[in-house]
Amino acid sequence: MKTLFVLTVFGGGLVHATLAPALRIADVAPDIPLIVVILLALRRGPEFGCVAGFVAGLLQDVAAGGLIGVQALTKSLVGFGLGAAGGRLRVTQPLVQVPGLVLLTVAEGVVRFTLLQLFRFPAPFGELMTFVVLPQALYNGFLGAALVFALAWTDALKERAT
């Protein structure tokens, strides 16, 4: 399980650093570590989601520069919250996971903006939501849908083989 965790989190960070710029559409890049954290939290629970979110966010903070710990805190909160809610809600269906991914991307962006306001971040909320958070949430939704359906297809193939 530790190997899976390391490969998934570091792989998500590596993919984000190398592939996300190539996937950029009109200055909007997907937040691949957030997608990985959400899928891990849904499958493994709150503790695993929290640790995965912290590590993925910290790697993203170090790679991007700026304030260290903001991405780590927001992604760990999302991972823990979704992992805790995942046991109570019916989130195993792909048609529930994808809108949840979009909503959680927006929520993570709002929490990150709130944290950055503590340090006098100079961007207005409306512009940040319109040009950064909402486009990234939609992009995460499309990319997450492809990933969720690929995982569902892989699980169906595994069941058919056994």
Image (tube, grey):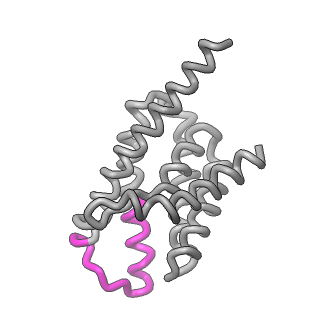
Q: Residue at x 45, y 28 (%)?
A: 93
| In this picture, residue 14 sits left or right of residue 145 | right
In this picture, is 160 found above or below 149?
Answer: above
In this picture, is 90 found above or below 55?
Answer: above
Please tell me whether the stretch drawn in magenta is mainly helix, strand or loop.
Answer: helix
| In this picture, residue 121 sits left or right of residue 92 | left
Q: Nearer the viewer, residue 74 or 23?
A: 23
125 inside magenta stretch: yes
Occupied quadrant, residue 42: top right
Name the quarter where the C terminus is drawn: top right
Q: Nearer the viewer, residue 53 or 83?
A: 53
Q: Nearer the viewer, residue 123 or 61?
A: 61
92 inside magenta stretch: no
Residue span colored magenta? 107-127
Would residue 3 be visible to someone looking at this image?
yes
Q: In x, y percent, where is residue 1?
A: 76, 43
**Number of numbered discs overlaid on the protein picture:** 0
